[in-house]
Image (cartoon, helix red, strand yellow):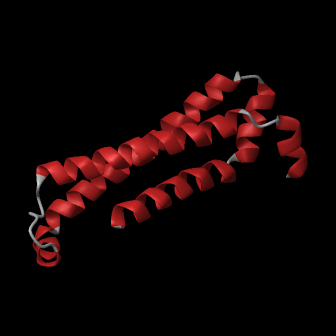
Amino acid sequence: MALLIAVIGLYGLMSFHVTQRTTELAVRLALGPQAWQVFAVVLRELMLVAGVGCALGLMASVSLRSYVSSILFGVSATDPVLLGLAIMTLVVVAILAAWLAAQRAASVDPAVALRRE
């Protein structure tokens, strides 16, 4: 259940980040870069955020293993299979969310986005 909540939150965060930068991305597109270049910039930034988040989460889960082991039954707090599965799930969702958000950002019509602002 916690993984599902984390996945939904991760997608919401990625989407919100791109929505907040719509004007900036529209200005970039209006100044000349191709849509694929804006796509690459957004995808790179979002994957950096996801990578840092996964690294911090892994460090937190290992450092809080005594607390986590008290609420887990039948599973080790440092089980490498479960930690790896959770991280891989979050990375796959982060890639998908970043891909969708970057694709939406690259398809923004600069005139419409700037006029809305």
Nearer to us in this view, 47 or 100: 100
Q: Is residue 48 visible?
A: no
Residue 98 coordinates in the image, percent (x, y): 52, 41
Identity of the residue drawn at 17% across and 72% down: 68
The residue that appears at 60% across and 37% down in the rendered structure is: 102
Q: In which quarter of the view is residue 4 placed?
A: bottom left
Q: Position of residue 34 (x, y in %)?
A: 70, 21
Above or below, 73 against 113 in this view is below
Residue at (13, 50) in percent of width and height: 80
Q: Is residue 40 left or right of residue 22?
A: left
Q: Residue at x 49, y 40 (%)?
A: 96
Q: How many marks?
A: 0
Q: Is residue 99 above or below residue 15?
A: above
Give percent across and percent down for residue 64.
17, 69
Please give left or right for residue 62 compared with residue 17 in the image.
left
Residue 93 seen by the camera: yes
Q: Is residue 27 above or below residue 75?
A: above
Q: Position of residue 43 (x, y in %)?
A: 53, 35
Question: In which quadrant will I find the N terminus?
Answer: bottom left
